[in-house]
Amino acid sequence: MASQEMKLPGTFQPPRVPQSQAKPGLEKNMQPASEPTQLKGDGFVDYVGNNKLKDKSVLITGGDSGIGRAVAVLMAREGADVTIAHLPEEQEDAKDTKQMVEAEKRSCFLFAGDLTNYENCRRVVDEHFRSYGSLNILVNNASQQYMCKAFTDIDLNTVEHIFRSNILQMFAMTKYALTYMKKGDTPGAIYTPIQPDTRTAKQMEGWHTKSPLGRPGQPSEVAPTFVFLASPEASLYCV
């Protein structure tokens, strides 16, 4: 009688090969490359989309590799068309990500440019809108990091550069994106017993109209977030 092969739980392991790269780091030079779609489970399982973002358009800064690549591919798997903003030196990684997005039967527009030049922030937003006619989702993902052994060793020119690349660039992207983005889902009151036990009947009348949705949220719209955070897929965030 042939023995059945045991299916081992999928568990991500730390990389075994010491490695270092000059900036910007490239996915194609990683050993091994990072994982964009597989999740831990009973054996590794691939993320399954179900059209949560059908026909939406998303602009992702730093979408060529790492977290940005994974976000691009999974949003495409959920039905979104994608624009990826990346540095010119990251073109090869960006092309690989574009192929992954297009394998999900969605469009992918690449924009090569340094977003610390804020004119590029305006340009990528405008070109995204020209490509898709909408801008539903902005993912401010692009950033840089530098290591320093002691606080006294910090180079202030590097600090200024980090603020331009990680903070001011995000403000610029958001400033220009808001021209095209509509008001949508925002935090708001949830319809639970805590609402009528803290308001008079008169205050309850029409209180929900202050929400951009024109209605209160329902507990069933919040609960899936708790389920996700309690699931194996959220093991990176919760211990």
Image: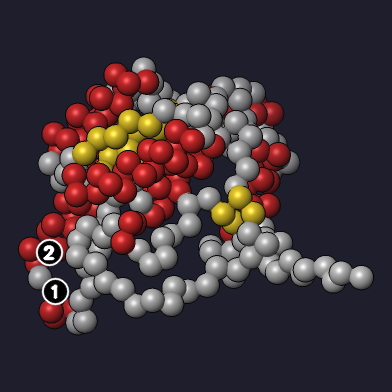
User: Can residue 109 be spotted in the picture?
Assistant: yes
User: Can residue 140 be spotted in the picture?
Assistant: no
**Three-letter amino acid code at the position of disc 2:** Thr
Residue at image location 53% in from the left, 62% down from the top: 237
Q: State left or right for residue 168 relative to residue 4.
A: left
- Could you say which is closer to the camera, residue 80 or residue 89? 89
- Figure check: 71 above or below 18: above
Q: CA distance from mark 1 to mark 2?
A: 8 Å
Q: Which part of the image, by quadrant, shows the C terminus?
A: bottom right
- Could you say which is closer to the camera, residue 13 or residue 115? 13
Q: Which residue is mark 2?
A: 158
Local crowd size for mark 1, using a 10 Å CA cut-off: few (<14), some (14–19), many (≥20): few
Q: Are marks 1 and 2 in contact (CB under 8 Å)?
A: yes
Secondary structure category for the residue under label 1 = loop
Q: Position of residue 218 (x, y in %)?
A: 68, 35
Residue at image location 41% in from the left, 38% down from the top: 99
Q: Which residue is mark 1?
A: 154
Which quadrant of the structure image shows residue 229?
bottom right
Residue at the outermost right position:
1
Which quadrant of the structure image shows residue 41?
bottom right
